[in-house]
Image (spheres, rainbow, N blue to C red):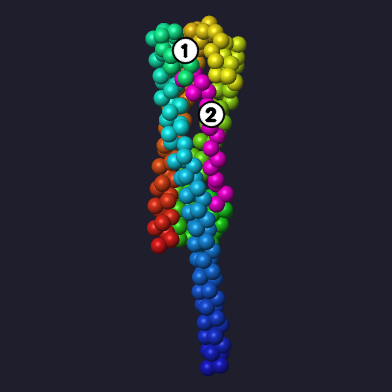
Amino acid sequence: MEVFIVIFGITVAYQLNVYYDDKKDLRLENAAIEKLHNENELNLTTFESLIDERLQIEDDTRELARILYAGQFMQDDSLALYLFEINQTYKPLFQIEAINFYLNTNYTNKNSDLKNELITLKSNYLQLRDVVEYYVRMKEKYYNDFLVSDVDFGEEKILSLDRIKSVEFKNLVVNLLANEIELNALFDKTYGMAIRLDDLIDRKLR
């Protein structure tokens, strides 16, 4: 009987220890998910702040290409407007610290679906960052340098139309348009994933 009592006591103590450890892990898990939620809300705000700007750059690039291929250099007063508007670039800062932290934790095995979603979203954030940096470098290197002798970007004045009328510049603008379209598609895809993550996190925290 004494042996049975000892064994029973050890078993109960073990089960209680497991129970409290599980409760502790669950609290830590929920705290990590809360951090994910806050970070994702910030990223959604960043996405939403860029929607109008990035779509406007795509539209302006498309319109500049139309003017160039129509040969409306002197007739269209908006040539200068589009020429300088598309010189803009943006480098959004998306946060992935909470994503990295959560992916490196192993508090519970309850949320494998959340981890899978985060792995894909992180991959898209890294791809988006690399594509944005690449396009910014390309625009600075080719667009600005190509027009450096014909355009005063500081004063936003066209000094000469020689290079602007060239076939090389038309092709350059078409390539810029393709870049903007591809970049916006990647933005939309990643933004949609961030929205889905927000819904998933809400369900986890209920």
What x and y, as percent, mark residue 172?
A: 50, 16
Q: Which residue is drawn at 49% across and 57% down?
A: 33
Disc 1: CA contacts within 10 A as few (<14), some (14-19) or many (>=20)? some
In what element is the residue under mark 2?
Answer: loop
In what element is the residue under mark 1?
Answer: helix
Q: Which of 185 and 11 is in front in this view?
A: 185
What x and y, as percent, mark residue 164?
A: 51, 10
> Residue under circle 2?
89
What x and y, as percent, mark residue 29?
A: 51, 61
Q: Which of 54 and 186 is in front in this view?
A: 54
Disc 2: CA contacts within 10 A as few (<14), some (14-19) or many (>=20)? some
The magenta-colored residue range is 82-98
Q: Residue at x 46, y 20 (%)?
A: 82
> Residue under circle 1?
170
Q: Tell whether position 97 is magenta.
A: yes
Q: Nearer the viewer, residue 184 or 78?
A: 78
- Amino acid type, label 2: Thr
Indicate which disc, 1 or 2, sits on the residue closer to the N terminus. 2
